[in-house]
Image (spheres, helix red, strand yellow):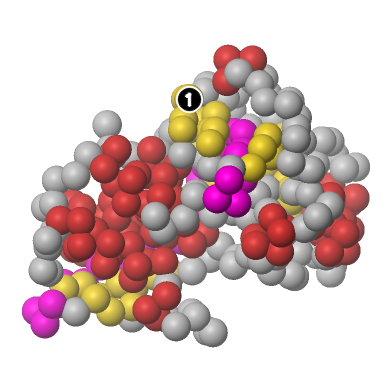
Amino acid sequence: MTDWQRDWPAPAKLNLFLHVVGRRADGYHLLQTVFRFLDCGDTLRCEPRRDGRIVLATPLPGVPPETDLTVRAANALRAATGATDGVSLHLEKRLPMGGGLGGGSSDAATTLLALNRLWRTGLDSSRLQRIGLALGADVPIFVHGRSSFAEGVGEHFTDVSLPPAWYLVLVPAVAVPTPAIFRSEALRRDTPAIAAVDWRPGFGRNDLEAVACALYPEVARHLDWLRHYGDARMSGSGACCFVEFAREAAAQAALAALPADMKGFVAAGVDRHPLAII
């Protein structure tokens, strides 16, 4: 099998905590968070084209192909490197849109990582991260590819070691638009910052959670149910929520008890993106 025939994984992420510690003059929020990848996600397949075009073969309903993050990532890589190759992008979408699991950002990062190899553009991780940051604040972590304490707008990383864990992730039937959360006057923006070395598993909260719950009661309902099993939290700007388990069997038992009108899945935490550049 050649690289052109393989599937390229785009894993989900969780924010184990997420604090808003300030706001820049340009309006961007300053964050602190810990990212962890999951062993599930979307899948990308790339097909070479002779006409030099970049084509999304699997467009998402309601999303113009030219605005899709995979297409934008491919165009950004061509602009940065002068590559002229064409490609058809086949994306198998499993992660929910507006779910806080990083699906679109992960897809963009995987597009950069895959085409960097397929087109032989030879960029290192730092250069790909800079390209990714222009696409979205969460794209660089997927390029960086390791469990990390992140700061700034989410682009400065300190790698962390995390214990093995399984997660029950619930997927409320709502899509939470990130801008609506960050525009809210109710959002706390002054949580005291900490040093990366002082972070420990279980620390903190998600500062975006209260706003998301107020705007989308389904998020609050799913969190309330999960809290029967532990310290449940929302990931990113929502809507997905999670709780951690030490053993897969316990996570699967909780999933089996899920009410009929809720959906979720169990996934293991992983400390390294499968496509990470060493």
In the displayed structure, 194 sits above or below 134; it is above
Outermost residue toward the front? 25
Which residue is found at the position 49% from the left and 80% from the top? 63
Give x and y (percent) for residue 151: 54, 33
> Is label 1 in a helix, a strand or a loop?
strand
Please name the residue that numbered disc 1 is placed on: 158
Quadrant of the image for the C terminus?
Answer: top left
Assign the magenta stretch its main secondary structure.
strand
Give x and y (percent) for residue 215: 84, 64
Along the line of sight, which residue is nearer the eye, 36 or 214?
A: 214
Which region of the structure is painted magenta? Answer: 25-52
In the displayed structure, 112 sits above or below 207; it is below
Along the line of sight, which residue is nearer the eye, 140 or 193?
A: 193
Which residue is found at the position 79% from the left and 43% from the top? 188
Say what amino acid the circle numbered 1 marks.
Thr
Give x and y (percent) for residue 242: 73, 46
User: Label 1 crowding class (10 Å Cα cut-off): few <14, some 14-19, many 20+?
Assistant: few
